[in-house]
Amino acid sequence: MKNELISVGIFICMILAIIFSINYLDKTYASIEKLNIQLEQSIEKEDWSKSDMLLKEMSNEMESNSSKVSIFVNHAEIDNINTEFSKLTQYVKYHNKEEAMASLYAVKFFFEHTLKLEKINTENIF
């Protein structure tokens, strides 16, 4: 009986951890997605000073959440996001609209992909 209670307790802890991680990722993604949309609009208008300001804000947001996110997200996914984000900062710095937009969409794709990988569904279970 003791072993069954321990197993049920561990199972409940795992479910709670999964729920916390998914909610945290959703909240983090929502705040970064809002900045991503603003950044896309400023790049389209070629407002490079505003784009640079939004990039710094986005970078701060990513850094403040990276320690918690790295606990439950595959590090390869985080590396992909960071690599593409680094390219994006340089494209904005040198006012390259086409490359900046492509890189921005890649960052957006990697965020969505990471979020999709962490959601509970049959594809991720089996």
Image (tube, rainbow, N blue to C red):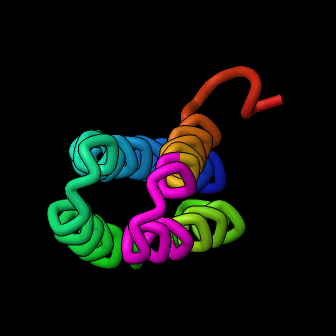
Quarter of the image where one finds residue 69: bottom left
Visible residue check, residue 85: yes
Figure quadrant of residue 123? top right
* Residue 124 position within the rendered picture, expressed as x and y whole percent measured from the top left: 73, 33
**Viewer-proximal residue among 94 and 110:** 94
**Residue at the extreme top of the image, as rendered:** 122
Report the residue at 72% width, 21% height from top: 122
Residue located farthest toward the right when viewing the structure as drawn:
126
The reply, left or right, for residue 76 in relation to residue 115 is: right
The answer to which quarter of the image holds residue 82 is bottom right
Which secondary structure type mostly characterizes the magenta part of the structure? helix
Asked if residue 111 lies in the magenta stretch, the reply is: no
Q: Is residue 50 above or below residue 14?
A: below
Say left or right for 38 vs 11.
Answer: left
Measured as percent of width and height from the top left, residue 19 is found at 40, 41
Q: Position of residue 80 (x, y in %)?
A: 65, 64
Name which residue lies at 23% across and 48% down.
Answer: 42
Note whether 64 is above or below 37 in the view shown.
below
What residue is at 64 percent from the left and 23 percent from the top? 121
Q: Position of residue 99 (x, y in %)?
A: 56, 56
Q: Which residues are magenta?
A: 86-101
